[in-house]
Amino acid sequence: MKKLKKLTRRQIQVLANAGYDFMEYLLERQNDKEHTYTYVHRTTKEVLVLNYK
């Protein structure tokens, strides 16, 4: 697994608008080509992929 990073304001906004608690997720990957953020839950290691514009 890659090094997980803290979230920026825009990443927090995308996560919160989708109905998730941004305090429980870290960023694993940002794909600008496909416009997606890949988040990982802090405790369960659940992977979540969300699109942004």
Image (cartoon, rainbow, N blue to C red):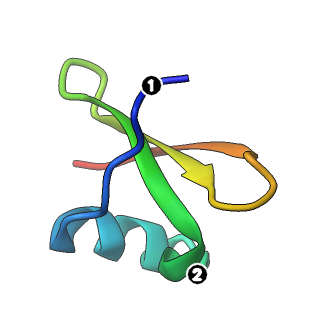
Q: Residue at x 33, y 72 (%)?
A: 12
Instruction: Indicate the secondary structure of the residue bearing disc 2.
Output: loop
Crowding near pointer 2: few (<14 within 10 Å), some, many (20+)?
Answer: few
Left or right for 43, reference 42:
right
Left or right for 31, reference 38:
left
**In the rendered image, which quarter is residue 7 located in?**
bottom left
Q: Which residue has dot 2 on it?
A: 21
Q: Residue at x 75, y 46 (%)?
A: 46
* Placement of 39 over or under 33, stated as above or below: below
Amino acid type, residue under disc 2 in the picture? Asp
Whole-percent x and y of residue 13? 31, 75
Whole-percent x and y of residue 28? 43, 37
Q: Residue at x 30, y 22 (%)?
A: 34
Q: Which residue has dot 1 on it?
A: 2
* Placement of 43 over or under 17, stated as above or below: above
**Separation of residues labelled 2 and 1 (CA atoms):** 22 Å
